[in-house]
């Protein structure tokens, strides 16, 4: 709708579920198991055929076959589900420990230098699992390693290698150390990144909960104030109605005009209070108003012009077919807040831009004021962040962001290339439009 500079702030619902870390970590375990399968098969074949060490080849190839089947099953589960439980991660690591134990049992037990690979499972468990589960992996791995010192199938060395067992052990230890170092760097960094993303998501949820609690308190105060102000406003309306018929007033045209202006102001206050109560679900006997998008937006603009006659406001509708919607007073108040912010920021004209696409109704307020500073964009939508320097400033944008978030929409704030600020509301048509219009 207008060109923009690169700096901007956007508030949108988080799409990264809290349990996605479990799914991503299971995917990493699957990748690690594929590497283990390939490494086991290659090592078994090299040792058996190239080095001439006789291994129980059929038995040792059964283990990677079962691991491959386990991986395929895990991939099917990952495709159908968006979360993986802690118990499933524990069982996956336990399977890998038992698979490694089986391979070591068939190839020399604790004398096999690859016995150190247990440390990979322990390290992964320390990052992925809860405390009791980690100690479970430690205990099982230690028990298996101890068992392999007494129960194992000895290696069947050829005559050529019979006197070089220690040299083979040193080479195998070096290979094992290199594998552990590479695997830990590759996978631990990625797992740590997944956990950091999860913590960041939980931090955003905590912040959102605190903001919503703040809104609840404000809503209770506003609702209570609306009830309290209703009675004195009604008394003012009655008194002004009586004044209109008093000879002392009717004989002075200037007083008649002032009383009429006072009556209009009282009616506007009562309409605002009715909107607050309706938004809080406390209005009685009033059904939802159905209207078109142009009528709804033009009604907002008409009321705002009446309250701000000295500031030009232009409405610009894109060439689209707009569905009929339910005129939500909360959206009306959100747009009115944006218009008020533009006026208070020092704008001399305001444009109200409306467009749509297949899924969203876009309503943008663009003014010719000073625009947003970099700090304002960084803190956009947070309470009490305002450039106006007055107490309570910033609550308007804070309420707008949270209202739109509750509706499943997005708020985009930026500075226009020709100056001024632009705030765009992206509202889901699935929430606003009537059922017959959605189809």
Image: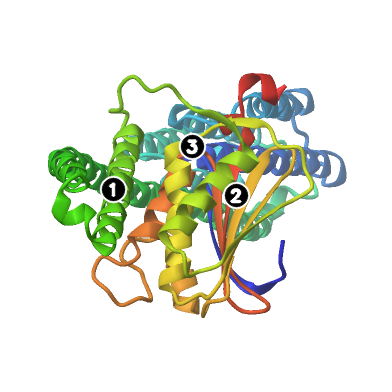
**Residue 13 on image: x %, y %:** 52, 46
Residue occupying the point 38% across, 23% down: 286
Report the residue marked by disc 1: 269
Residue corresponding to mark 3: 19
| Distance of label 1 from label 3 (alpha carbons) | 47 Å
Q: Is residue 377 positioned above or below 210 on the image?
A: below
Residue on which the image places disc 2:
113
Query: Which is nearer the N-term, disc 3 or disc 2?
Result: 3
Classed neighbour count for the residue bearing mark 2: other residues with Cα under 10 Å, few (<14), some (14–19), many (≥20) = many
The quadrant holding residue 8 is bottom right
Quarter of the image containing the C terminus? top right
* Looking at the image, residue 95 lies above or below residue 271: above
Q: Element type at marker 1?
A: helix
Q: Position of residue 17 (x, y in %)?
A: 51, 39
Element at label 2: helix
Of discs 3 and 2, which sits in the foreground? Answer: 3
Question: In the rendered structure, which disc, 1 or 3, sits on the residue that comes first in sequence?
Answer: 3
CB within 8 Å, label 1 to label 2:
no
Taking the image as drawn, is residue 169 in sight?
A: yes
Above or below: residue 263 compared with residue 142: below
Left or right of 390? Residue 404 is right
What number is the disc on residue 422?
none
Q: Nearer the viewer, mark 1 or mark 3?
A: 1
Q: Is residue 278 left or right of residue 240?
A: right
Vertical order, 189 against 126 (above or below): below
**Residues marked 3 and 2 touching at CB (< 8 Å):** no
């Amino acid at each position: 709708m207008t060109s923009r500079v690169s700096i901007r702030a956007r508030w949108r619902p988080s799409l990264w579920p809290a349990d996605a870390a479990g799914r991503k970590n299971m995917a990493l375990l699957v990748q690690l198991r594929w590497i283990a399968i390939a490494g086991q098969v290659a090592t078994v074949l090299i040792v058996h055929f190239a080095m001439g060490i006789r291994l129980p080849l059929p038995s040792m190839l059964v283990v990677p076959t079962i691991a491959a089947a386990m991986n395929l099953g895990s991939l099917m589960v990952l495709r159908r589900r968006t979360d993986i439980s802690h118990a499933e991660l524990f069982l996956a690591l336990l399977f890998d420990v038992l698979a490694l134990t089986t391979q070591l049992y068939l190839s020399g037990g604790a004398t096999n230098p690859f016995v150190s690979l247990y440390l990979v499972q322990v390290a992964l468990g320390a990052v992925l699992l809860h405390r009791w589960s980690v100690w479970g992996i430690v205990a099982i791995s230690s028990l298996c390693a101890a068992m392999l010192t007494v129960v194992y199938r000895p290696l069947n060395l050829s005559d050529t290698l019979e006197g070089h067992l220690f040299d083979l052990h040193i080479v195998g230890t070096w290979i094992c150390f290199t594998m552990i170092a590479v695997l830990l760097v590759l996978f631990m960094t990625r797992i740590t990144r997944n956990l950091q993303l999860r913590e960041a998501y939980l931090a955003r949820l905590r912040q959102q909960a605190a903001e919503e609690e703040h809104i609840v308190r404000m809503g209770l105060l506003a609702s209570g104030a609306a009830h309290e102000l209703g009675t004195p406003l009604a008394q003012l309306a009655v008194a002004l109605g009586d004044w209109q018929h008093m000879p002392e007033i009717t004989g002075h045209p200037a007083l008649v005009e002032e009383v009429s202006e006072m009556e209009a102001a009282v009616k506007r206050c009562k309409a605002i209070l009715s909107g607050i109560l309706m938004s809080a679900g406390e209005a009685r006997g009033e059904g939802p108003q159905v209207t078109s998008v142009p009528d709804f937006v033009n009604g907002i603009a008409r009321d705002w012009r009446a309250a701000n006659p000295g500031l030009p406001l232009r409405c610009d509708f894109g060439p689209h077919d707009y569905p009929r919607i339910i005129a939500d007073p909360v959206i009306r108040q959100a747009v009115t807040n944006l218009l008020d912010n533009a006026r208070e920021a020092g704008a001399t004209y305001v444009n109200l831009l409306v467009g749509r696409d297949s899924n969203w109704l876009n309503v943008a307020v663009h003014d010719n004021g000073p625009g947003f500073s970099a700090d304002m964009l960084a803190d956009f939508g947070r309470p009490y962040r305002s450039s106006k320097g007055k107490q309570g400033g910033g609550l308007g944008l804070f309420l707008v962001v949270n209202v739109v978030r509750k509706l499943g929409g997005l708020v985009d704030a930026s500075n226009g290339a020709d100056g001024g600020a632009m705030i765009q509301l992206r509202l889901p048509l699935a929430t606003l439009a009537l059922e017959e219009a959605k189809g």
